[in-house]
Amino acid sequence: MGSLVVKDGLYYALAFSAAGVLVGLSFSLVWSLPLLLATAFCLYFFRDPERAIPEGPVAVSPADGRVVQVRTYDDESRRVSIFLNIFDVHVNRSPIEGTVTEREYRAGRFMMAHRDEASLENEQNTLAIEGQGSRVIVRQIAGLVARRIVCNKQIGDPVEKGERFGLIKFGSRTDIFLGPEWELSVREGDRVHGGSSILARRRLEQAA
């Protein structure tokens, strides 16, 4: 069970609100308004709502946002890229149930996250999750404003479908790589919600 606001957001909000009160008492309420607005924004940005997780042989979205690209490779695997603006929930969730078998962080650039090159050149953290005969890769990608990727899972950790595993602060992108055993349920331009939107379904012969 998660809280309504990510812990990091509570820390930011507390700092801004304390500064706002101090400025208000020392000078005037008018001078404290920007800090109080920053407090409200942090509480909004770091919100962490509960989600209804779909059952069955499906992969759920690892993030809130808009599907900006679907790329198909020669082996019929696919990459679904989801762009998160500053108004989206930035908590990342596991698309399937399984075990984390790989984790790799790579420093990089901070270009606009919706650009295709961001998948290779931006700062990023990659998790491979294996379960029920499938291997799914999730990549957290920092954006132009985002400067902090948070991931609280390590190699060997079990994850449930829809379970929170981290977040990216202040605008970002999340890529998910699905093998040919998955049939996509989304297309470019679709809006998705982490943990509750179905990105793909296992093909019947593969699921069996």
Image (tube, helix red, strand yellow):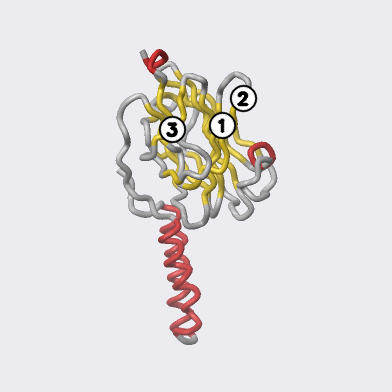
Quick one: 108 or 154, which is closer to the camera?
108
Q: Which residue is mark 1?
A: 79
Look at 49% across and 73% down and name the residue there. Answer: 35
Q: Tag 2: Cα neighbours inside 10 Å, few (<14), some, or many (≥20)?
A: few
Q: Position of residue 206 (x, y in %)?
A: 42, 15
Q: Is residue 104 above or below residue 130?
A: below
Q: Amino acid at mark 2?
A: Tyr
Q: Position of residue 190 (x, y in %)?
A: 47, 44
Q: Which residue is mark 3?
A: 185
Contact? badges 3 and 1 (CB < 8 Å) = no
Q: Position of residue 181 (x, y in %)?
A: 47, 19
Q: Secondary structure at mark 3?
A: loop
Sooner in the amino-acid sequence: mark 3 or mark 1: 1
Look at 50% across and 40% down and name the residue there. Answer: 151
Give me the disc on residue 73.
2
Sooner in the amino-acid sequence: mark 1 or mark 2: 2
State the separation of the CA atoms marked 2 and 3.
17 Å
Q: Quick one: quadrant of the N terminus?
A: top left
Using the rendered view, name the quadrant where residue 14 is placed. Answer: bottom left
Contact? badges 2 and 3 (CB < 8 Å) = no
State the separation of the CA atoms marked 1 and 2.
8 Å
Total count of labels: 3
Using the rendered view, name the quadrant where residue 42 is placed. Answer: bottom left
Question: Which numbered disc, 3 or 1, marks the residue closer to the eye?
Answer: 3
Q: Position of residue 174 (x, y in %)?
A: 53, 41
State the separation of the CA atoms marked 3 and 1.
13 Å
Sooner in the amino-acid sequence: mark 2 or mark 3: 2
Contact? badges 1 and 2 (CB < 8 Å) = yes
Q: Is residue 17 above or below residue 113?
A: below
* Position of residue 13 in the picture relative to residue 77 (left or right): left
